Image (cartoon, rainbow, N blue to C red):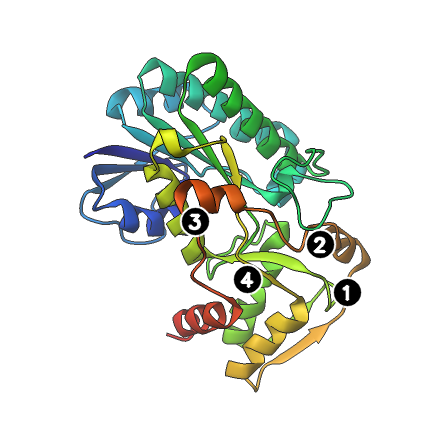
Amino acid sequence: MSSCLITGGAGNLACQLSRVLSERHEKLILVDIAEAPRERLPGNAIYERADLSDEVQVRDAIETHRPGAVIHLASLLSGGCEEDRVRAWRVNCNGTFALFESALEHRVGTVLFTSSVAAFGGELPDPLPEDAPQWPDGLYGVTKMTCERLGVYFHRQHGLDFRCVRLPITISRFAAPGAASSFASHAFIESARHKRFTFRVAPETRLSLIYVQDSIAAMASLLAAPAERLTRRAYSLHAMTVTPREIAAAILKRLPEARITFEPDPAIARLVASWPGAMHDSRARADWGWKPQFDLDQTAKHILDELLG
């Protein structure tokens, strides 16, 4: 067993992932700029503050702990990227470059990077092939695409065991408000808390979704997969294709008193409609056994049970 360092360690995704990984690694190190993690960590995990935009702090964290693996979750999200482009590039790209360099220098075994469907853009085919051309429209997507290509470069030219998972829209009760795709999560959150929600997208838009529990399981599986089984460096995931109308129906099945309406905002609706309704993920299924466990009905039950306590 070895140690594993997780960037973006204060976030709920990292905290949940740490619980899954706690039995596989003798030590977990979660690093983030926030003062404290959002949730209680397992007993073999420690939390340290570090600013990913500071290359010295990134190198110090790797040098101090010499982890066997790194899971790179830290990133400014889409809203923050557009509000502060300079900081977005510093955190998302410069910080990632420094992390890859330090991982090489200190012989980190594996670096797992989380990317997004936002790394693609333009007129996308549906379903979306894993090797579709990547021309992202927003800066967040540009930084994700850049780091994907950077990781592949470090793998091909320098032997870094870089692995990447591209997530579709992810449903989570801790969805960040700065993400363009968070509307799917907030439909559940607001319906549970306030018994109302208004979709700003068209009701029949096809969406590629995944529940956060499946995201966590997929990352843990890819991290543990034997290197000789991997046929590529970046894997797309897809769990279900649903529409906002179907999400509303799944919520109303359990919260019939909720008031859910549709008032599409042209700009938001256009953006969401440009995303694929499905993503090819056959290589993930074949190479390391990826298989989603949650459909929409199971997702709705699980997340609403958690939100309602």
- Residue at x 45% of width, y 23% of height: 54
**Mark 3–mark 4 distance (CA, rounded to whole Å):** 23 Å
Which amino acid is tagged 4?
A: Ser
| Among numbered discs 3 and 4, the one appearing first in the sequence | 4
Whether label 1 touches label 3, CB < 8 Å: no
Residue 272 - label: 2
Neighbours of disc 4 within 10 Å: few (<14), some (14-19), many (20+): many
Which amino acid is tagged 2?
A: Val
Would you name the residue on which mark 3 appears? 290
- Say which element carries label 1: loop
Which residue, as the protein is rendered here, is positioned at the far bottom? Answer: 257
Would you name the residue on which mark 4 appears? 185
Neighbours of disc 1 within 10 Å: few (<14), some (14-19), many (20+): some
Q: Where is residue 58 in the image (x, y as percent from the top left)?
A: 39, 24
Q: Which of marks 4 and 2 is in front?
A: 2
- Residue at x 40% of width, y 47% of height: 289
- Say which element carries label 3: loop
- Residue at x 67% of width, y 39% of height: 120
Q: Vertically, is 77 above or below 258?
A: above
| Among numbered discs 1 and 3, the one appearing first in the sequence | 1
**Mark 1–mark 2 distance (CA, rounded to whole Å):** 11 Å
**Mark 1–mark 4 distance (CA, rounded to whole Å):** 17 Å
Q: Nearer the viewer, residue 195 or 127?
A: 127
Q: Position of residue 253 (x, y in %)?
A: 54, 82
Neighbours of disc 3 within 10 Å: few (<14), some (14-19), many (20+): many
Would you name the residue on which mark 1 appears? 264
Q: Nearer the viewer, residue 38 or 126?
A: 126
Q: Nearer the viewer, residue 262 or 145?
A: 145
| Among numbered discs 1 and 4, the one appearing first in the sequence | 4
Q: Vertically, is 252 above or below 20?
A: below
| Among numbered discs 1 and 2, the one appearing first in the sequence | 1
